[in-house]
Image: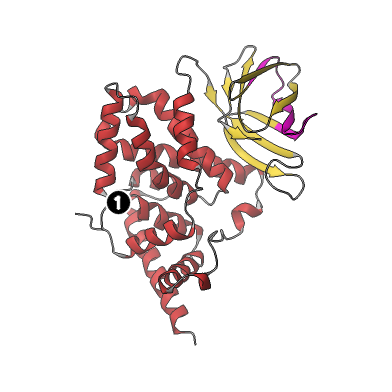
């Protein structure tokens, strides 16, 4: 019933073949949907960029991850933690604010204080994490799930 | 080939999920995640950012499912949500980093080189190359329409800063350019 020109079917097959979604994507989305906490009210931060400062595989070497929601920007610098397979996170939120940070990594939860827009978490297991911000005088914020 | 099957299966899964069948959303994710991926990639954002936008779309659905006015059109709702977010992120990146090389560099196909596969793949690579020679607006329009039989012209017109009435003619011009780009290439020795 579509009146579409047939070349769009060729285009579709071409994009499916040459730029397919990452293999883990579907499973990751199912997990993200299942883990969503419907009882909490928050604004969802969007990923703006994710860069390894040094050339290397994902998770190795310093990693900078930047998120935003309206005028709020969150910058995370991820480095190797004190033990194997751990990460240290230094974070900055602008405009500067005080409050609390809650980082969820699987079953683990780590808390930190947000002071003048800065926080640090010395050690978390590497893998998929999500970070929540309870910011004094503003809406709570949360990152999506992402890998460190 | 139309993709009505996917749209119908998505609407059914969404209906069942809203009436309490918790696992049904997994079926919806299965149907629509690949489509959302391709629609978001049309905005020439890198893979990590595209993944995040797809996740944003699903979390928005879970949180705002009650606000979906027409459950029959859930596929369109998901696509528009993803496109709006992709547009916002792309616009912000451009503003903050006007010469962001990620946005300027042609996106390269990530699959293995052509010689490892047969003629079909060669056709795909030729088509990819022809699309890459089009301007950004054409590239986005063609990829969005390739994955969305019934694209929402109203939002496309806002994004592209052109009247709704111009999208049909633009679509035709983009296809003509694509065809001539392919035949120019085919004419080379």
Q: How is the image coloured?
A: secondary structure
Residue closest to the eye, B97 or B77: B77
Q: Is residue B70 visible?
A: no
Is A98 placed above or below A65 here? above
Q: Quadrant of residue A122?
A: top right
Is B49 placed above or below B168 here? above
Label 1 crowd (10 A; few <14 / some 14-19 / many >=20): some
The residue under the point 30% across, 51% down is: B149
How far across and how far down the image is residue B166, in percent? 35, 55
Q: Quadrant of residue B138?
A: bottom left
Most extreme residue toward the left is A1
Indicate the secondary structure of the residue bearing disc 1: loop
Most extreme residue toward the top is A137
Q: Which residue is mark 1?
A: B149
Dominant SS type (magenta) = strand
How far across and how far down the image is residue A78, in percent? 73, 34
How far across and how far down the image is residue A129, in percent? 61, 29
Q: Which residues are magenta?
A: A76-103
The residue under the point 39% across, 24% down is: B64
Q: Chain of mark 1?
A: B
Q: What is the tally of numbered marks visible in this picture?
A: 1
- A129 horizontally vs B152: left or right: right
The residue under the point 53% across, 61% down is: B109
Q: Is residue A48 magenta?
A: no
- B30 horizontally vs A133: left or right: left
Residue closest to the eye, A34 or B92: A34
How far across and how far down the image is residue B53, in percent? 50, 39
Quadrant assignment for the N terminus of chain B: bottom left
């Amino acid at each position: 019933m579509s009146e579409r020109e047939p070349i769009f079917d060729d285009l579709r097959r071409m994009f499916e073949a040459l730029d397919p979604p990452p293999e883990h994507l579907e499973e990751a989305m199912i997990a993200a949907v299942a883990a969503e906490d419907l009882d909490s009210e928050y604004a969802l931060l969007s990923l703006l960029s994710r860069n390894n400062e040094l050339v290397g595989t994902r998770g190795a070497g310093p990693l900078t991850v930047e998120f935003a929601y309206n005028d709020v920007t969150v910058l995370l610098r991820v480095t190797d933690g004190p033990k194997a397979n751990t990460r240290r996170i230094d974070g900055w939120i602008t405009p500067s604010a005080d409050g609390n940070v809650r980082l969820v990594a699987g079953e683990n939860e780590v808390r930190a204080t947000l002071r003048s827009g800065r926080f640090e978490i010395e050690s978390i297991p590497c893998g998929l994490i999500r970070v929540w911000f309870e910011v004094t005088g503003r809406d709570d914020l949360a990152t999506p799930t992402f890998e460190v | 080939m139309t993709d009505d099957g996917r749209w119908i299966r998505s609407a059914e899964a969404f209906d069942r999920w809203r009436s309490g069948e918790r696992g049904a959303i997994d079926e919806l994710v299965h149907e629509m995640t690949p489509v959302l991926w391709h629609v978001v990639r049309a905005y020439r954002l890198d893979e990590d950012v595209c993944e995040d936008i797809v996740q944003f779309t699903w979390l928005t659905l879970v949180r705002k499912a009650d606000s979906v006015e027409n459950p029959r059109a859930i596929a369109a709702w998901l696509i528009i949500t993803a496109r709006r977010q992709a547009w916002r992120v792309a616009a912000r990146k451009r503003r903050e980093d006007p010469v962001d090389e990620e946005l300027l560099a042609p996106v390269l196909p990530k699959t293995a080189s052509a010689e490892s596969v047969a003629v079909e793949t060669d056709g795909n690579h030729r088509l990819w190359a022809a699309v890459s020679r089009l301007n950004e607006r054409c590239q986005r329009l063609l990829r969005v329409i390739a994955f969305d039989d019934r694209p929402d012209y109203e939002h496309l017109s806002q994004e592209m800063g052109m009247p709704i009435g111009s999208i049909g003619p633009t679509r035709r011009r983009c296809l003509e350019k694509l065809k001539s780009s392919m035949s120019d290439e085919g004419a080379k020795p």
